[in-house]
Image (cartoon, rainbow, N blue to C red):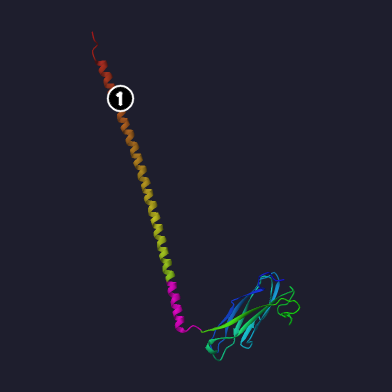
Amino acid sequence: MADTGRPLISVHPDELKFTFELKKQSYCDLKVVNNTEHHVAFKVKTTSPKKYFVRPNSCTLQPHDACLIRVTLQAQQEYPPDMQCKDKFLLQSTIVPSNTDGKELSPDTFNKGGGRLVEECRLGVAYIFPSSPQEKSEEEAFRGSMQSFDDDASLALQRIKDERDAAVRQTQLLQKDLDMMKTQRYRRSGRGFSFMSALAVAFVGVMIGFVLAFLYSSPSAE
């Protein structure tokens, strides 16, 4: 049984687009993804089989596997009216036994009879003009300008980073000098305090000695 609410396969993109040039082939790639836990076979059909070359046009995908289909538009001899294309593609898919050979599917693999679940995915086709030389040159110029802009932005960003790093280094040096000045000032203030204390103690000692000497040298009262 298929997973509830999900198609058996997903196809990307949902429209085939070919760059149309007279007498030149063009191709479009389709990615087909198995969304289930089962082996799923698919087959590609088109309303204009002589115009397109499809490889592979059938395959069996293992659970959650994917494959790439290349659809080639054969060289055309004239432009379609108004560059409009009415061609359609149909991808049929169905669950098959795990031992199914994807390269040799039986003719009735995609028959809807007998209760077999066969899903169908329809894809449209669009032709687009190739880019003119002027458009190509404009596109290349645009890409070049964008690359130049990216380069300038990278250089500007690098300059900002270099200036930031230089500012950080300068700040670190200034902080180091400031710390050294604080240390030296602290040491000088410590030495000054000790010297003044010593002078004060010496002065007090001299004064005490002078007073004692005066007392002892004074004559005793009769």
Q: Amino acid at mark 1?
A: Gly
Label 1 crowd bin: few (<14), some (14–19), many (20+), radius 10 Å? few
Label 1 secondary element: helix
Q: How many marks?
A: 1
Query: Magenta segment, which residues?
Result: 130-148
Q: Nearer the viewer, residue 216 or 112?
A: 112
Residue 155 locus on image (x, y percent): 41, 66
Q: Quadrant of the N terminus?
A: bottom right
Q: Is residue 105 left or right of residue 187?
A: right
Residue 202 locus on image (x, y percent): 30, 27
Q: Is residue 17 magenta?
A: no
Q: Name the quadrant containing residue 191.
A: top left
Judging by the rendered image, the residue that carries numbered circle 1 is 205
Q: Nearer the viewer, residue 27 or 187?
A: 27
Q: Is residue 221 above or below residue 31?
A: above
Q: Is residue 48 above or below residue 95?
A: below
Residue 114 locus on image (x, y percent): 76, 78
Q: Is residue 177 above or below residue 36?
A: above
Residue 222 locus on image (x, y percent): 23, 8
